Every structure is written in structure tokens, then in C-alpha cells.
Amino acid sequence: MNPFGTFVQLVVDGLAQGSIYGALALAIVLVNQATGLVNFAQGSMAVLGSYIGMTIGNLFIPGVGAILGIIIGILVAVIASLAIGGIVERFVMRRFERAEEDTKVVATIGLLTLITGLVGLIWGFNPTPYPFFFGGSESLRIGDVSISVWSIVTFTTIIALMIVLQILFRGTKLGLGMRAVADNAPSAALSGIRVGGMRMAGWGLAAALGTVAAILLASKSQLTPNNFDGILVYALAAVVIGGLDSPLGAVIAALGITILESLAAAYIPWIGHDLKVVVPFVLVFAVLIIRPQGLFGRRTVVRV
Amino acid sequence: MKNIKGYDAIVANRWVRLGVFLVALVVLAVLPLVADPFTNQTISHVAVFAVAILGLNIVMGFTGQVSLGHSFFVGVGAYAAIIPIRDWWGGPLAEGAIVIGFVLSALIPGVLGLLIALVTVRLRGLALAMVTIALPTIGLPLAQKFSDFTGGNEGVSIRRLDYVGADGEIHKGNPFAAGPGLANDQWQYYIVVAIAIAFFALAYFLVRGKYGRAFAIVKSNEAIASSMGVSPYRYKVLAFTIAAVYGGVAGFLLVAWGQFTSSETLAFHNSIDLVIASIVGGAGSIVGAILGGIFYVTVSQIMNGLQLSIYTTLVQGVVIVIILFLLPGGLASLPRTIRRLVRRGRAGHSVDAGPTAGSTTENTK
């Protein structure tokens, strides 16, 4: 293969993998906007959603055919994770609303463990294949360049979802309410917005977005209860680099670090495949030193 | 302090406290001579992780920051301890290699912790958690990459090392084998528990004095801390560095306990388990670290014993959520909570209910 072809392939695969990290990073930013905390259980909630999709999909496929079965599975998974996100916010995280920041972090760590344990209890810890339209190895040839179908579908799906979310936030009353709550919850409550409901909606949307990303990832590899532990770490790196208050920044950072990582692995020999994981975190440290609020974040001033 | 009576007065009396401490010390000293090897090994194992969790408590419970990369420091400390012992114990250094391993196990994680803290503590609150979660993720491939040094996935074992005996022949030996009169498990128990007690004593005096007060004020309000001339940045860096040193020493103790380590020691899930154990025990207290160590070791031991190890994660998750809801101060705050409930029961409904969920890391010392 020619060098240019390899380069394009690396960038496209990087964009696809990066869009998965970006989806989770965006989910984390959404939750942070809605409730002011970082949800370390975001990945495990996504995995739970994708397991539900797999089970429902496999249930329907013999009856209604593969395509329809897969679609039903995905729809049920998205609806279920909307509900799960809302329920977790209402019945678990609401309790820690006024607690200190470190307690909230620990609470989401508890959720991470609980959900991972629950998924392991129901579905076991062995890798399970996810029923999907195509496998991870199919690829499309354009001239000299071969690009995997999975990468194209993943990237376009997640970018489309992000546009839909943007429209939701900018153009609908629900989105306006959610932004009002994120900006100033007491004022929002005074103007008649149901703060609790908006927070539940924020958590639900974040969980649903994560679930779609988890399904896309599972269609390439396989499902395990810890599927998203590593991805969570990348998503958090993207959030730190992009800025906790910048949805767009988090997504751009996620795409950027993934492409840089795969390019560094391919073109810098001593990094190679083993050490590529170090690249994003060197960037994290560089950003923290130069611009602690993140590349796209706003500096916050704390009043006493 | 004038109206305390009964139980409180007894607990508050320093002579009673000292007496309890001395009795505990004597029990810990005599126990290995009469107990079976399994008990000795379990208690030493608890001591190993109690030290690791104590470090976590200093950074989480006393200074109010969450570190999700503590297993990284335990793992690095274990490598820093085991590699010099593997390479030098059989040579002219002999037992000196163990001392070097011990010093390095504190020094290397401490320096790494200092560097990481200098950068990450600049951001408030969540940044430390979000960055430290990456440490195991970076550490694992690094450990596997330099497999000549770290043994890769197989890890490093020092149970059978070559050494030149008095007769000039080469023998196989274990650096942590017992001298005459003691069994291996007893000897390792004494090493691990003695070092653990020393580090608990250090932490006790640290958090009681100037530093403890500085940590507490930084935790409760950084602005007030600055206005009082206590630099939040400096004390947060200090707390994180101390935590890293404790993690590293726990790594040495792990090597003394099992004479083995691998990249698995620094895996991500161990960090999570340590945080959970810290909160379950009580992050804001020194006794909590011991309870956390007991929780860490016995839960997986019991689950493995029942052949239910696949449910270990679920049990930990259920316990941590229950603790967060019902006993935010961890098991260490249980006596106090019971007393408060009893008192409230006596006083009828006149006492207000208080906040629903307080801080998990409330000081109970």
C-alpha cells in the first residue's frame, strides 16, 4: 500500500475510534453541565445499555429477521438507557446533591462498581459478540485507499447524533430549560423550570449517547462488562484537554488525541503500538501546565 | 468538653487509649507464635493494604481530594522493591539489597507522586481524580514494554534466588525466609506488621499536629486556608506525595508478604478497590484504614472461598452504595453513629435529623 493510503486509513480509523471517545466525553460534559459532577460510571452505564440492546436484539432476530431485530435492539437499548440515566440521577445522585465534591466522585465510583458487578452477574464476564449489520473487518476500497466500513459508519453516526443534540439544546424548550439549569439552578427554579426533571433529562441523554457509542464499539470488538474502563480514561483525558465546560472542545480533543496517538504509533518507531497510550496523557500534562482550564474551557472565578 | 460522661469519658481518657494501644501491640506481637500460618498470612496481607489505604485516607479523607491511581504507586513501589532484591541480594550486598529495595520503594513513588501533584493539583477538585485515573492505564503498558526489567506479564518472583553459600556453592534461597526459630509466615508477619505499625504511628502524629490542621482547613475551605497563610497548593501537593510514599511502601510490604509482583499489581481495578475499601473503612480516620484493609482482603478471600469470585465486584458495589447512603463516615464512624442514635432515641424527636448525606470523608479521629 502506498504511504498516502496508509496515512488516510490511519486518520479515518483514528476519527472513528476518536468519535467513540468523543461521545463518552460529550456524555461526561453533559452530566457535568446538568449536575456539576464528573460521572465515572458513564462508561459502565453505556456498557449496561449495550448489553440490553444485545439481549433484545438476539431475542427478536429469529422472529423478525436480522435487520429489524438489530434495529429493535438498538432502540430498546437507547430508551432503556434514557430511563436508567434518569433513575440513577433521581434515586442515587440526587441524594449527594449537596455533598462535597469528593463524595460525589466516590458515589459515581460506587455506581461504576455496582453496575459492572450487576452486568457481570446477569451476563457473565466472558466476551459476547454483538449482533450487528456488518462485521469489524469489512472495508471499502476507494482507489488505493481502503477504509473500514465500521469506521465510516461509526464516525458519521456519532457526528450526526452530536448535531441532533446541538439542535436539541439550541432549538427546543427542553434544551433551553437544561441550559438554564446548568447555568443557574436557583434562578431556573424561580422561573418555573423543573430543575430535577431537567437534571434527569441530562443524565438520560448522556446515558443514551454513551449507549450508542458502546453498541458501535461492541459491533467491532465484543462486549465485556469492563469494555469501557479504558475508553473512560481516554474520554476523561479529552475532557481535561478540551475543558469540562466545553462540549465542542471535548469532542475535538477526543478526535485530536486519537489521531495523534495512532500517527505517533505508526511513524515514531520507539513509541510503536506498546507505548501509544502514553501520548494522550503527555498531552494532558502539557495542557494542565500551560492552560489548566482546558484548551476550550473558561477560567472560573470562585467567589467566597 | 465538660459534659462528657460514661463511654465518651472512658474513650477520651488518654491513659485508656494508651492502654488499649499497648494491649493491641502485645496481642499483635504474641499472636503469630500461636496462630496458624493462614491467619498470620491473612493478618500480614491486611497490614499491607491497610498501609496503602492509609495513604489514600491522607489524600482523600484528610485533604479532600480523590486519587484514582493509587494502585500505580503500589505497583511502582513493588517493582522498586523487588528489582534491587532480585539483582543484588545474591551478591556482595546480601541483606543490604532489601534495605535498598525498601528505600527505593518509598523514594521512587514519592518523587513520581510529587511531580504528578505539582501539575495536577493546580486545578480544583475533580482534576486530580480525572488525571490520576490515567496512571494505571499508562503504567500497565510501560511495565509490559520494559519486560527485561519488570518481567512483563509473568512478573518478578524472588522466592528462589541464587546465592553463594558459606560452602562456596550456589544455593537457591528466599530473601524473606525466616531465620532459626521462626517459620516463614511468622517472620514475614513480623516484618510487615512492624513496618505497618511504624507508618501508622507516623501518620497518627502527622494528622494530629500542624500538618493535620492544615490539611483539614484546606479541605473545608481553600479560600479561608489561603487567607490564614496556609497554601492549599502546597498542602495538597504534600498530601498527595505522602500518599504516594505510603502506596510505595505498601508495594514493598506486598513483596515482603508474597515475594512476587507483576504488572497486575498496578491495574486500574485495584485502584477502584482501594478507594472503595478506604470509604467503607472510613476515609477520614486512621482506624478506618485498618478496617478498610480488612474489607479489602477478606471480601475477596471469602468470595473466593465460597467459589463466588465473579460476584466480588457486585458485593463491593452494593456495600459501597449502602455505606454511602447510611454511614458516610465509613465503618470507623459506626460506634459514634450508634451512640448518636441512642442519644436521639432518649431525647425523643427534639433533635433535628441533620443532613441526609454528609461527607464520606468527615474526620472521625
Image: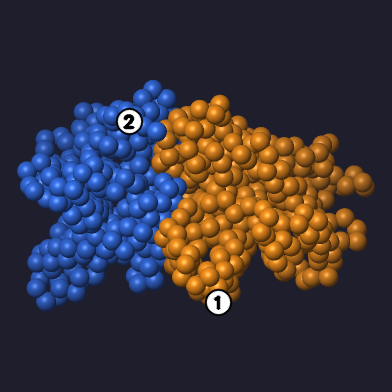
Can you give x and y, in whole percent of width and height, for residue B97 in the image? 77, 39
**Chain bearing mark 2:** A
Q: Give the residue type at disc 2.
A: Thr
Give me the residue at 52% from left, 37% from top: B218
The amino acid type of the residue labelled 1 equals: Leu
Front-most of residues A217 and B311? B311
Residue A183 appears at what percent x and percent y? Answer: 22, 40
**View extreme (right): residue:** B167
User: Which chain does the orange colour mark?
Assistant: B
Residue at position x 69%, y 36% in the image: B104
Farthest residue, direction top:
A290
The image position of residue B252, as x and y in percent, is: 68, 46
Q: Is B232 situated left or right of A225 in this image?
A: right
- The alpha-carbon separation of the residues under discs 2 and 1 comes to 51 Å
Residue at the disc numbered 1: B306
Residue A300 is labelled as 2
Disc 2 crowd, CA 10 A, few/some/many (<14, 14-19, 20+): few
Mark 2: secondary structure = loop
Q: Inspect this view and state whether residue B32 appears.
A: yes
- The answer to which image quadrant residue A272 occupies is top left
